[in-house]
Image (cartoon, rainbow, N blue to C red):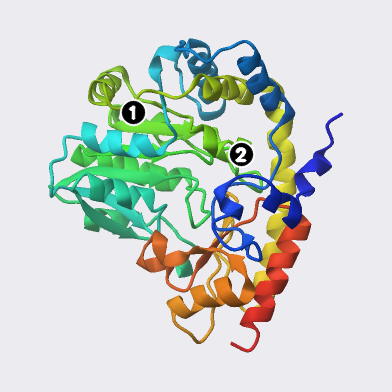
């Protein structure tokens, strides 16, 4: 019998006994909170789907038609699209979509790609790998990480080929407003610039906020946009590497042409898990996760503020991005967290220069693990 308390059941000992790099990158006396993987158990209906797939020997090449139909139904219902399965393309997570969007944008080495600062670092990696130049659209913590459109206009020029958007935003935790998205749309449409939107976290939003998909705001911007989702964050399935994207037929044709021979979709086990996760009977799981995360968010926010940290409002994702107002360098802060506090956190500068003195913490865990981690951090920063 399912009980929502299972989401609050993780222990340090249990996580160390389980596989996964989050808890095994560092020595066993370090609490793993650096990677955006939840400490929650896998939903029982997803486990059942995976076991059934193995039992049925669904391990040969197979079609992903049913999964793409479920993906289309999901984004139609939640995000306001009007898609069929033929408008969906399955990828190995969201990251390949970043590379694919650059390839399809017409960009050539030396052209510019707009990235926010801070931003999920694989966006930077994709720009570097494709030999493009990042154009930094700076988001300021003191402004609540507002997506200032005037700031975007300043970084756009004739060499700009693509705008990367991450909404909800990793690592700031901001959920973009419709007005902010409309501002991006205007800039992109007026300058005929392509957009790639990572909406991986669209289930994880708080306080009744509504996530808005940029590509639904106008037919003109839809023709410029690639939108990508996945099952890794809400469902805790990053190891299955299953993402999916959509675009208008003309754009999709270009994406598939460039992906041919390079991207091969994902595994049959990932497809089985995706179908189970996106089926409507799993909505209770999402509801219970949001309820638990809301409680955890409140605890972490209060404790960090009591330590003297500046804490950006966590509107979406389960990634807290506190700024430590201590008298030391960022490198010294990293060392303090790792070696003194014994808590493995994500270093803020990995997400851009604006991450200076910030650390990223994954709060998708139990109250007991969170409490121990915060106690260690508080003790380490006391009088610093």
Q: Nearer the viewer, residue 137 or 339?
A: 339
Q: Residue at x 55, y 58 (%)?
A: 34
Quadrant of the rendering where the C terminus is positioned: bottom right
Tell which circle, 1 or 2, labels the residue nearer the N-terminal end. Answer: 1
Q: What kind of element bears circle 2? A: loop
Q: Which mark is residue 103?
A: none
Q: Secondary structure at mark 1?
A: helix
Whole-percent x and y of residue 253? 26, 18
- Residue found at the far right of this picture: 1
343 and 302: which one is in front? 343
Measure the alpha-carbon separation of dots 1 and 2. Answer: 29 Å
Residue visible at 54% across and 80% down?
A: 325
Residue that label 2 marks? 236
Image coordinates of residue 181 in percent, x first then y, are 40, 43
**Which quadrant of the rendered structure holds the N terminus?**
top right
Determine contact: label 1, label 2, CB under 8 Å.
no
Residue 84 is at least partly visible in this image: no
Q: Quadrant of residue 371?
A: bottom right
In the image, residue 281 sits, relative to residue 39, either above or below, namely above
Q: Is residue 286 visible?
A: yes
Local packing at callout 1 (Cα closer than 10 Å; few below 14, some 14-19, many 20+) is many
79 with respect to 55 (left or right): left
Mark nearest the camera among 1 and 2 is 2
Residue 378, x across and y down, in percent:
68, 77
Measuring 54% from the left and 57% from the top, which residue is drawn there? 25
- Residue 194 vs 292, above or below: the answer is above
* Furthest-bottom residue in this view: 383
Number of numbered discs present? 2
Q: Which mark is residue 222?
A: 1
Residue lying at 48% horizontally and 80% vertically, measured from the top left: 332
Measured from the top left, where is residue 287 in percent x and y?
72, 37
């Amino acid at each position: 019998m399912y009980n929502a308390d299972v989401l609050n059941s993780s222990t340090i000992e249990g996580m160390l006994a389980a596989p996964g790099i989050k808890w095994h990158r560092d020595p066993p006396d370090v609490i793993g909170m650096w990677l955006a993987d939840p400490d929650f158990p896998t939903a029982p209906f997803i486990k059942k789907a995976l076991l059934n797939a193995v039992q049925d020997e669904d391990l040969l090449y197979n079609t992903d038609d049913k999964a793409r139909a479920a993906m289309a139904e999901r984004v139609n219902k939640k995000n306001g699209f009007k898609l069929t399965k033929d408008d969906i393309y399955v990828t190995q997570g969201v990251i390949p979509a970043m590379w694919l969007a650059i390839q399809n944008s017409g960009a050539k080495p030396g052209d510019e790609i707009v990235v926010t600062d801070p931003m999920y670092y694989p966006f930077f990696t994709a720009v570097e790998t494709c030999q493009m130049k990042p154009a930094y659209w700076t988001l300021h913590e003191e402004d609540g990480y507002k997506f200032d459109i005037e700031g975007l206009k300043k970084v756009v020029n004739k060499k700009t080929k693509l705008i990367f958007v991450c909404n909800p935003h990793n690592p700031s935790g901001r959920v973009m407003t419709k007005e902010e998205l409309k501002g991006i749309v205007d800039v992109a449409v007026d300058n005929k610039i392509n957009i790639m939107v990572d909406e991986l976290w669209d289930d994880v939003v708080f306080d009744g906020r509504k996530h808005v998909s940029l590509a639904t705001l106008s037919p003109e911007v839809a023709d410029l946009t690639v939108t990508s989702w996945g099952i890794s964050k809400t469902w805790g399935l990053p190891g299955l590497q299953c993402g999916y994207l959509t675009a208008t037929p003309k754009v999709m044709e270009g994406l598939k042409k460039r992906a041919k021979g390079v991207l091969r979709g994902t595994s049959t086990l990932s497809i089985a898990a995706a179908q189970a996760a996106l089926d409507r009977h799993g909505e209770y799981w999402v509801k219970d996760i949001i309820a638990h995360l809301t409680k955890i968010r409140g605890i972490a926010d209060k404790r960090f503020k009591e330590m003297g940290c500046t804490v950006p409002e966590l509107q979406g994702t389960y990634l807290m991005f506190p700024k430590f107002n201590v008298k030391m360098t960022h490198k010294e802060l990293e060392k303090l967290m790792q070696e003194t506090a014994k808590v493995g956190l994500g270093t803020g500068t990995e997400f851009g220069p604006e991450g200076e003195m910030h650390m990223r913490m994954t709060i998708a865990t139990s109250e007991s693990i969170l409490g121990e981690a915060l106690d260690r951090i508080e003790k380490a920063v006391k009088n610093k």
